[in-house]
């Protein structure tokens, strides 16, 4: 964990953007998986801004089989999150789930 924080801090200080996938893996359903604590820890320790992005249609790719099917994939960029609020992570998860629910095929 210390190594992860150090590497993330180095990247941010060098002007790079961090992409964090807080579920840890892709859900096989239309419901987001619980968010892992590492995302919250990184954001709060490094005082990062969070730009949630929801991907709808990523089931077009079967990672384990390395196969793809024709599909429309949509990206939704939500508003930047105020991480000073106590419940910011769960509120972010709820807003992302709402976008998934509204754009389900």
Image (spheres, rainbow, N blue to C red):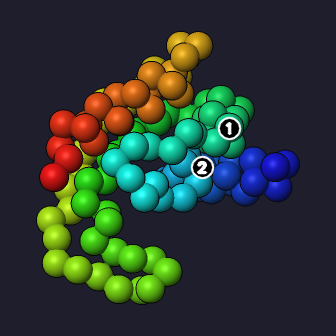
Residue at 39% from the left image edge and 77% from the top image edge: 62
Left or right: residue 83 versus residue 99 is right
Mark 1 or mark 2: which is in front? 1
The label number, if any, that marks residue 12 in the structure image = 2
Residue 17 position (above or below residue 34): below
Q: Which of the pair 39/4 is nearer the observer? A: 39
Left or right: residue 90 versus residue 6 is left
Instruction: Tell me which corner region of the image, top left, top right, bottom left or bottom right, holds residue 58.
Output: bottom left
Badge count: 2
Residue at 28% from the left image edge and 71% from the top image edge: 60
Q: Residue furthest right?
A: 2
Is any atom of residue 93 visible in this view?
yes
The label number, if any, that marks residue 37 in the structure image = 1
Q: Which of the pair 24/105 is nearer the observer? A: 105
Left or right: residue 52 versus residue 8 is left
Element type where label 1 sits in the image: helix
Element type where label 2 sits in the image: helix
Indicate the position of residue 8 as horizontal and vertical percent values. Answer: 67, 52
- CB under 8 Å between callouts 1 and 2? no
């Amino acid at each position: 964990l210390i190594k992860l924080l150090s590497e993330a801090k180095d990247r941010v200080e060098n002007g790079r953007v961090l992409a964090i996938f807080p579920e840890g893996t892709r859900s096989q359903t239309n419901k987001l998986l619980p968010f892992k604590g590492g995302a919250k820890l990184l954001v709060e320790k490094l005082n990062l801004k969070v730009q949630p992005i929801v991907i709808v249609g990523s089931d077009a790719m079967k990672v384990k089989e390395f196969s793809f099917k024709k599909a429309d994939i949509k990206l939704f960029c939500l508003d930047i999150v105020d991480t000073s609020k106590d419940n910011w992570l769960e509120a972010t998860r709820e807003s992302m789930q709402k976008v998934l629910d509204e754009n389900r095929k």
